[in-house]
């Protein structure tokens, strides 16, 4: 689960927005992800959730360092 990076992080040229992992581990249990998303929706009902599945496990968003 990734969310917007803090706005103090300046994205590199050509990148519109940076994202950051919002959980500590390398992998998140699907039930935990579902609970996290429910809390986020309660906080911001206009939230966009994008699910990306890739056989190689690649991440298709720009991440903070």
Image (cartoon, rainbow, N blue to C red):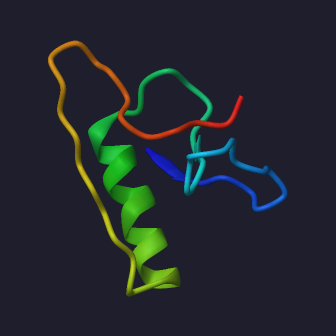
- The quarter of the rendered structure image containing the N terminus is top left
Residue found at the far right of this picture: 8
Residue 3: percent from the left, percent from the top? 53, 54
Q: Is residue 65 above or below residue 56?
A: below
Q: Is residue 1 left or right of residue 14?
A: left
Q: Is residue 34 left or right of residue 54?
A: right
Q: Is residue 22 above or below residue 59?
A: below
Q: Determine the residue positioned at 22% across, 41% down.
A: 52
Q: Determine the residue positioned at 69% across, 41% down.
A: 12
- The quarter of the rendered structure image containing the C terminus is top right
Q: Is residue 56 above or below residue 39?
A: above
Residue 16: percent from the left, percent from the top? 55, 56
Q: Is residue 22 left or right of residue 8?
A: left
Q: Is residue 65 left or right of residue 16?
A: right
How many labels were placed on the picture? 0
Residue found at the far top of this picture: 56
Residue 44: percent from the left, percent from the top? 48, 83
Residue found at the far front of this picture: 13
Residue 12 or 39: which is nearer the viewer? 12
Residue 22: percent from the left, percent from the top? 58, 46
Q: Determine the residue positioned at 58% across, 36% down.
A: 63
The answer to which quarter of the image holds residue 48 is bottom left
């Amino acid at each position: 689960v990734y969310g917007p990076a803090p706005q103090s992080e300046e994205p590199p040229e050509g990148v519109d927005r940076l994202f950051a992992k919002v959980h500590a581990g390398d992998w998140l249990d699907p039930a935990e992800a579902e609970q996290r998303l429910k809390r986020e929706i309660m906080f911001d009902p206009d939230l966009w959730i994008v699910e990306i599945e890739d056989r190689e496990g690649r991440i298709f968003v720009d991440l903070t360092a």
